[in-house]
Structure formats: structure tokens, C-alpha cells
Image (tube, helix red, strand yellow):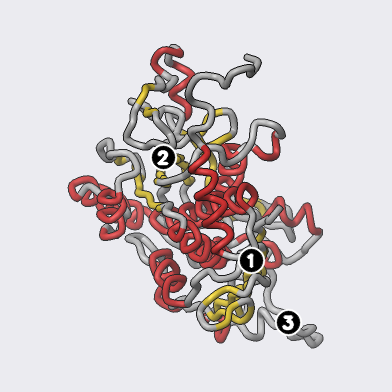
């Protein structure tokens, strides 16, 4: 079984971010240009902070590729941190000389990893926690996701998304898994495909900035062309909906995930929740259709041939210019929380990260289902599977037991 895995390393203000991606087949076209395009998308967005004016993320592929194609060995991706130049001394790798230690962060921020991380790792200086807990790490995930996106595209699968609501401003319903919607969202600095709603979202961000506050919202990620049968109902760890929910929840500041109708299924009868199955000869290998997709393309922990649709709720960023009450860990007295340079709203950036995680989860499921040490093998295995999808249809063979 071919298993796709990745690991990231690096601190927010350290020298670089590094990602290692293993399990790719040989012969996949990979280049820095496609990765950099998604990295640039992650850095854009109305309401971003000063860090984005410093960083201009560019990836370097340092292993696993030759002549623009994967070798089948681990792929290494490196993204330098330009802001490292301003942090060389306080974030140095070597031991600090006596008397040169930087000032410690001792005022934990409500909503951030500061306090829980101190308890877990025993760090006195909260910077040892916040540097890795920072959403800066997601740049490495976006790089990995861009490679996985290329893998999916070669197999006829497209991934996109948009912002559904921001700071309480809700956009109109959008056509499901529509490339036109995805394209419009990419042109919007709030990642919303509706121009009127985008204007209201920008106004909400402006008001939050004046108030020294932050905003979150709901994002939607989707995939078209996913074959049925990815994932499994046989083992709870193999359920594709569970894997996708975990991947999206692992993104910093994501607090809820919905697939298909999501929480709305709790208030509706089954007749209005489940998607009827109808005969349809449009696809000879999968001769059926669904008039709705309330399941979000996932049933019983497996893809069912419909578009994958998932939504995620991002909380407001916990670093506020008007900080919330906290406690000074040196004195135990009431204080205001530490202030770190941050954004007013990073929801459009979170959408790019969520797309990357969806790309990874689907690419991993495809690798596990179809194996193959080369792209030629993967394509052949997928095509053979598609050709055999119609096998359960038709009358039973003579002598077959029902």
C-alpha cells in the first residue's frame, strides 16, 4: 500500500519552513511555479497584517525531483523566512551567552496556545510555544497541498473553494463545486465570489480594525471528479469524512467542520436529508445520479461519486490590538495579554490552507486505493477501476447465489 505522508518543521521567526512529503509516485510533474502560486494566494487577502509585507514566500525544491518530475523518493520543500534577519539574535539556534537572553513573553493570550503549551512543555518563555503554534506553519502545508493538487489534476480531480461568511456577513448560496465560483473567489480579496457581499465584508474588516478587534467566518472547500469508493467503512481510521474533518480541524483557529448539510441535518427529517439515487446513463461506468448532495459526497466514510463539499468555521485571531485580560506569570497579578504582530482577518488565507489539506487528504486516499510506483501505474489502476464500476449492475449470472 502506498501511503502519502508529510511533516513540517520550522518556527514563525526562524530561518525557514521545511516540509517533507513521502509516498508520491515517480513521474509526477512538479515545479516551483505552481507551488509559489498557491503560496502567493495564502499571503493575499483584505485584513492581513504587516508580516505579509515582509514575506514573499518562494519555495525551493531540494530533493525528490529531477528534470521537473518526481523520482518516487521523499520530496523536500523549503520556504525561507525573510523576517529571520530581524530575529537572528532572539531566535538564534545556538545557546545564549549569559546576560544576552532576550526578554521573555510571560503574558499569555486568551485563545492562543501560549498557556496550554507552557503547561505541556514546561517552557518558561511563552515564545517557545507561540513560535511553532503560529499560523506561519501553514505556509509549508500550502506548499505540500500544491504538489498534491498537481497530482489530483493529472487524475481529473479539481479542488477549489470560497468564503461563505465573514464577521457575520453572509453571502448568497453558490452553485456546488462550480469552477466559475472558485475563479470569482480567487479574484476577490476576501475570497467571496459575490461582489456586493465582498464590499460588506471589507467594511466589516475596516470597522474591526478601528476597534482593535479581529474577525472570523465560514469557508467552503470542494472537489470535483472524485471517484466513488475512496476511504472505507471497515475501520474507523479509514473513514474519509473523519480524515477530512481532522485535517481541517488541525488548521490553526478552525473550531468547527461541516460536511454537506452539516449541523442542519439535526433539525430535518430523513426524507429531506438523504439524497435519492436515480438511474442516469450519462456515465456508462456509473449509471446513476443524485438530485441533491446533502451528504457532501461522503456516505459511510467513503466518497460516493458526488462532489466533496466541506465547510469550516474559523474563530477570530486571538492577538488583539486592544488585548484581553490575562495574568502576569511572573507576579500572578492581573494584566493585559501579550501583543504580537497579527492580522485583523485571515479567513481568505485559511481558505487556501483548507484547500491544501483537502488536496492532501484526497491524494492520500487515492494513493491508498490505487497504489502504483509511477504515474503511469496510477493512471492505469484508476482507469481499470473506473471500467469495473459497472460490474454490480445487471442481472445475476446463471448459477450465482443472491
User: Quick check: 3 left or right of 269?
Assistant: right
At x 48% / y 33%, what residue is drawn? 390
Q: Secondary structure at mark 3?
A: loop
Provide residue 300's location: percent of width, then percent of height. 58, 28
Dot label at residue 388? none
Q: Residues within 10 Å of mark 2 (few under 14, many from 20)?
A: many
Task: Return the disc, 1 or 3, that comes first in the chain's sequence.
Answer: 1
Return the residue nearer the eye: 216 or 279: 279
Residue 171 in sight in this render: yes
Q: CA distance from mark 1 to mark 3?
A: 25 Å
Provide residue 50's location: percent of width, then percent of height. 42, 71
At x 40% / y 44%, what residue is drawn? 220
Name the residue tied to disc 1: 21
Q: CA distance from mark 2 to mark 1?
A: 26 Å
* Image position of 351 with respect to 308: above or below: below
Quadrant housing the C terminus: top right
Name the residue tied to disc 2: 307
Task: Return the disc, 2 or 1, that comes first in the chain's sequence.
Answer: 1
Task: Return the disc, 3 or 2, that comes first in the chain's sequence.
Answer: 3
At x 64% / y 54%, what residue is drawn? 371
* Image position of 15 with respect to 354: above or below: below
Which of discs 3 and 2 lies nearer the camera? The answer is 2
Amino acid at each position: 500500500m502506498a501511503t502519502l505522508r508529510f511533516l513540517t518543521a520550522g518556527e514563525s521567526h526562524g530561518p525557514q519552513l521545511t516540509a517533507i512529503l513521502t509516498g508520491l509516485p515517480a513521474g509526477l510533474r512538479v515545479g516551483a511555479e505552481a507551488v509559489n502560486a498557491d503560496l502567493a494566494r495564502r499571503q493575499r487577502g483584505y485584513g492581513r497584517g504587516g508580516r505579509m509585507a515582509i514575506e514573499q514566500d518562494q519555495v525551493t525544491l531540494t530533493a525528490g525531483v529531477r528534470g521537473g518530475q518526481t523520482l518516487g523518493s521523499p520530496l523536500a520543500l523549503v520556504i525561507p523566512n525573510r523576517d529571520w534577519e530581524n530575529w537572528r539574535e532572539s531566535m538564534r539556534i545556538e545557546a545564549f551567552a549569559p546576560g544576552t537572553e532576550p526578554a521573555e513573553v510571560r503574558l499569555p493570550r486568551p485563545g492562543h496556545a501560549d498557556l496550554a503549551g507552557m503547561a505541556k512543555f514546561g517552557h518558561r518563555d511563552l515564545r517557545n510555544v507561540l513560535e511553532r503554534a503560529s499560523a506561519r506553519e501553514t505556509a509549508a502545508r500550502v506548499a505540500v497541498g500544491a504538489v498534491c493538487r498537481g497530482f489530483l489534476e493529472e487524475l481529473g480531480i479539481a479542488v477549489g473553494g470560497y468564503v461563505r461568511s465573514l464577521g457575520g456577513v453572509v453571502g448568497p448560496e453558490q452553485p456546488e463545486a462550480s469552477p466559475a465560483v472558485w475563479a470569482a473567489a480567487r479574484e476577490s480579496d476576501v475570497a467571496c465570489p459575490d461582489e456586493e457581499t465582498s464590499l460588506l465584508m471589507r467594511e466589516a474588516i475596516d470597522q474591526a480594525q478601528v476597534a482593535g478587534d479581529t474577525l472570523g467566518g465560514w469557508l467552503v472547500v470542494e472537489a470535483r471528479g472524485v471517484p466513488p469508493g475512496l476511504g472505507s467503512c471497515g475501520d474507523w481510521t479509514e473513514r474519509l469524512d473523519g480524515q477530512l474533518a481532522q485535517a481541517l480541524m488541525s488548521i490553526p483557529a478552525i473550531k468547527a467542520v461541516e460536511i454537506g448539510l452539516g449541523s442542519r441535518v439535526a433539525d430535518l427529517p430523513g426524507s429531506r436529508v438523504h439524497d435519492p439515487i436515480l438511474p442516469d446513463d450519462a456515465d456508462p461506468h456509473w449509471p446513476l445520479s443524485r438530485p441533491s448532495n446533502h451528504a457532501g459526497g461522503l456516505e459511510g466514510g467513503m466518497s460516493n461519486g458526488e462532489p466533496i463539499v466541506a465547510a469550516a468555521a474559523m474563530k477570530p485571531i486571538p492577538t488583539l490590538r486592544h488585548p484581553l485580560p490575562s495574568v502576569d506569570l511572573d507576579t500572578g497579578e492581573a494584566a493585559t495579554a501579550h501583543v504580537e504582530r497579527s492580522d485583523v482577518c485571515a479567513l481568505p488565507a485559511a481558505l487556501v490552507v483548507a484547500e491544501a489539506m483537502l488536496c492532501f487528504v484526497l491524494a492520500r486516499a487515492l494513493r491508498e486505493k490505487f497504489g502504483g510506483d509511477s504515474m503511469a501505474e496510477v493512471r492505469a489502476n484508476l482507469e481499470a477501476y473506473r471500467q469495473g464500476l459497472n460490474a454490480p449492475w445487471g442481472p445475476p449470472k446463471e448459477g450465482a447465489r443472491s
